[in-house]
Image: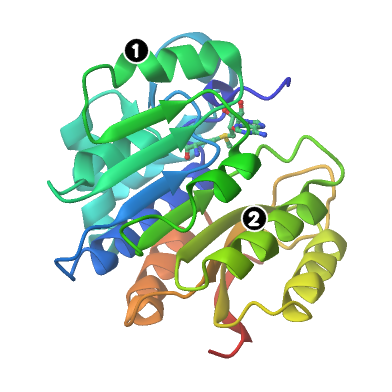
Amino acid sequence: MNYRHAFHAGNFADCMKHALFIELLSALQRKEKPLLVLDSHAGIGRYDLSTGPAEQTGEWRDGIARVLAARPQALGAYTGWVERLGLYPGSPAIAAAMLRPQDRLVACELHPQDAAALKRQFAGCARVGIHARDGYAALRAFLPPPERRALILIDPPFEDRDEFATLSEHVIASYEKFKTGCYVLWYPIKHRAPTRAFFESMRLSPVRDIITVEFLRRPAQDPARLNGCGLMIINPPYGFTEAAAPMLAAFEAAFGEPGCSSGIEHLTDA
Ligand SMILES: C[S@@+](CC[C@H](N)C(=O)[O-])C[C@H]1O[C@@H](n2cnc3c(N)ncnc32)[C@H](O)[C@@H]1O
């Protein structure tokens, strides 16, 4: 396990993922019923961007720093949470802050040091459970939840050549057990071949109601660079695509280089 999210916290991909995640969670919280948030690959939750790994790469300067400088209206909910939470928040910190009294967060992190940091951060938070375990196995362990409603974020590091195949295999198996959850799968876009195969495996699966939301800061031609990223969303909440469109336009304005693009596609019908 070489990947440490601290080197990449606050980059453009983090901004896109978190802004859309906040929109999804807010949409699901429009119903009063309790909700489980399951974060399978959680990271350490809070990141000091002014020092250590984040300062070393400086990726955040080309990410969250641009968003905070431009303050686009469409990303107002996201910038609001980033400012309220102080130290730059990762997905479990955002989810924990947004929980209502009836909601729960389960966050899994496999790296022993990162899991320990996460446990320290949420010690004493009754509605937050931190588990030092494999996030894919956790999908089987925690789903379906007693609440029968869940937002499931799956955000693996993609260090492994087979990560796309592993991801689709585990998501398809979870869906078989729990068909009504809202699953959110983050994926990198370097070039198109790996995502095409991933989409095809999901399209041919029993999973229904899948959309992809993508932002490419430049054309996906150089396989050595993170040219863009996407979220594959299963069972997106009502109204989500309409809310996501202006957010994508804001990403283009903040991060776009010549040839940038974004889009929302329906991969399979409901
Ligand atoms: C991209 S980062 C997560 C970032 C976090 N979701 C956020 O948005 O703030 C991926 C994390 O997954 C962890 N990880 C890698 N393999 C894992 C596994 N099999 N199960 C759980 N966590 C894993 C890594 O240590 C890393 O912290």
Q: Residue furthest bottom?
A: 269
- For the question of whether residue 216 can be seen, the reply is no
Question: Disc 2 residue type?
Answer: Gly
Q: Residue at x 52, y 66 (%)?
A: 178
Q: In this orientation, which residue lies closer to the viewer: 23 or 234?
A: 234
> Residue 153's spot in the image, x, y percent?
49, 51
- Give the quadrant of the N terminus: top right
Q: Quadrant of residue 246?
A: bottom left
* Residue 199 circle label: none
The quarter of the image that holds ligand 1 is top right
Disc 1: residue Cβ within 8 A of ligand 1's nearest atom: no
Question: In the visual, does 207 lie left or right of 100?
Answer: right
Vertical comparison of 21 with 50: above or below: below
To which residue does mark 2 refer? 228
Check the image and tell me how it is coloured: rainbow
Q: Earlier in the sequence, mark 1 or mark 2?
A: 1
- At mark 2, the secondary structure is strand
Q: In this orientation, which residue lies closer to the viewer: 124 or 263?
A: 124
Vertical comparison of 26 with 92: above or below: below
Vertical comparison of 107 with 221: above or below: above
Question: In the visual, does 161 lie left or right of 217?
Answer: right
User: How many residues crowd mark 1 within 10 Å: few (<14), some (14–19), many (20+)?
Assistant: few
Q: Residue at x 50, y 9 (%)?
A: 52
Question: Disc 1 residue type?
Answer: Arg
Q: In this orientation, which residue lies closer to the viewer: 231 or 66?
A: 231
To which residue does mark 1 refer? 120
> Residue 219's spot in the image, x, y percent?
73, 63
Distance (Cα) linking label 1 and label 2 = 33 Å
- At mark 1, the secondary structure is helix
